[in-house]
Image (spheres, helix red, strand yellow):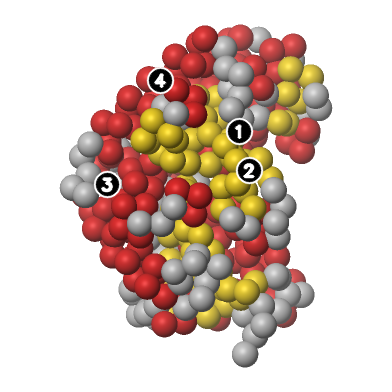
């Protein structure tokens, strides 16, 4: 028996497999990859294990079609659900993915009652509500991956626009995951220099627009949702929790009055550690940003209103 702690990734599609792969290379936890499709999680797990011989990490990824192997997981990442296809909005996925996320959450919670749940399934904000309602776990232990991905996209465009290293870009994206996201330009810097000193308002507007439509851009190019950046973004959240890094990362958290929003999952900066969300960080927003966040919360409420639970 391995004495390492366990992380479960539900959904062995592209996002889940990438998340499992990144976690395996980090080499601090055993990973269980679960999927209903027979042979798929077992095959991907075996492939990732064999990559360990090349890259030099301990092969400990297990593929499973059931949940027994997931028992006692410290963190569970839920990527299960249908991805978007061209012409499909995130909201079109509500009914189908609600059933899937409900089922997965019930099974995961039964096997790992103390786990922290990271939701990646779309439409993200609504699926977080489903997972919280079904698990009945405290809000600190149920939250979603969206803002890190949106921020990564924004940071990439900023690096290209300013001819800078992406390592020096500090950006922050808030709000719902989708066209209503709110990049906080006032809190965005390159090597400590405010973005507005390095790029024109027009260039910034174009980057903000491209970030908001970032998922759709990839769906249009490939015919399916992105997976490398989302998988790595979920793994970064797992790192911060499992390694007690206390990173401040934009995540989809349940708000109860923060940012003037109550009873809704929204993307905000949070401090992530072994207890899950250890703090919600409230940024000073400009009037424009605050209005954009309110509009974003209204759009999220509308999607959540479609849920049956």
The residue that label 1 is drawn on is: 281
Q: Which label was assigned to residue 160?
A: none
Report the residue marked by disc 2: 271
Q: Are marks 2 and 1 in contact (CB under 8 Å)?
A: yes
Residue 10, relative to residue 308: is it above or below?
below
* Alpha carbons under labels 4 and 1: distance apart: 17 Å
The answer to whether mark 2 and mark 3 are in CB contact below 8 A is: no
| Disc 1 packing (10 Å; few <14; some 14–19; many ≥20) | some
Q: Position of residue 200 (x, y in %)?
A: 66, 10
Taking the view exactly as shown, the residue that stands out farthest to the left is 308
**Residue 286, image x, y percentages:** 57, 12
| Residue 143 placement, left or right of 286 | left
Ranked by sequence position, the earlier of labels 3 and 4 is 3
Task: Tell me what residue is drawn at x 23 percent, y 53 percent.
Answer: 96
Indicate the secondary structure of the residue bearing disc 1.
Answer: loop
Measured Cα–Cα span from mark 2 to mark 3: 29 Å
């Amino acid at each position: 028996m391995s004495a390492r702690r366990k992380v479960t990734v539900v959904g062995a599609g592209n996002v889940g497999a990438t998340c499992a792969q990144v976690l395996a290379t980090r080499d601090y936890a055993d990973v269980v990859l679960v999927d209903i499709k027979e042979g798929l999680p077992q095959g991907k797990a075996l492939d990732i294990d064999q990559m360990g011989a090349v890259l030099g990490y301990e092969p400990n990824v297990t593929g499973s079609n059931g949940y027994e192997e997931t028992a006692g997981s410290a963190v569970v990442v839920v990527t299960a659900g249908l991805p978007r296809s061209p012409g499909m909005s995130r909201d079109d996925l509500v009914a189908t993915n609600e059933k899937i996320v409900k089922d997965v959450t019930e099974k995961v919670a039964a096997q790992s009652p103390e786990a922290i749940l990271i939701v990646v399934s779309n439409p993200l904000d609504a699926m977080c509500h489903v997972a919280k309602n079904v698990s009945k776990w405290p809000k600190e232990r149920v939250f979603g991956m969206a803002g890190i991905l949106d921020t990564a996209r924004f940071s990439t465009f900023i690096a290209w626009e300013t001819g800078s290293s992406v390592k020096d870009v500090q950006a922050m994206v808030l709000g719902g995951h989708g066209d209503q996201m709110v990049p906080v330009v006032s809190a965005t810097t390159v090597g400590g220099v405010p973005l507005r000193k390095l790029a024109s308002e027009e260039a910034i507007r174009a980057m903000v627009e491209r970030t908001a439509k970032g998922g759709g851009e990839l769906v249009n190019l490939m015919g399916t949702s992105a997976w490398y950046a989302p998988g790595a973004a979920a793994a970064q959240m797992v790192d911060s929790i499992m390694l007690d890094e206390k990173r401040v990362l934009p995540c989809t958290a349940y708000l109860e009055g923060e940012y003037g929003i109550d009873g809704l999952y929204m993307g905000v900066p949070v401090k992530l550690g072994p207890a899950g969300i250890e703090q919600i960080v409230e940024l000073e927003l400009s009037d424009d940003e605050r209005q954009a966040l309110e509009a974003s919360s209204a759009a999220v409420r509308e999607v959540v209103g479609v849920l049956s639970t």
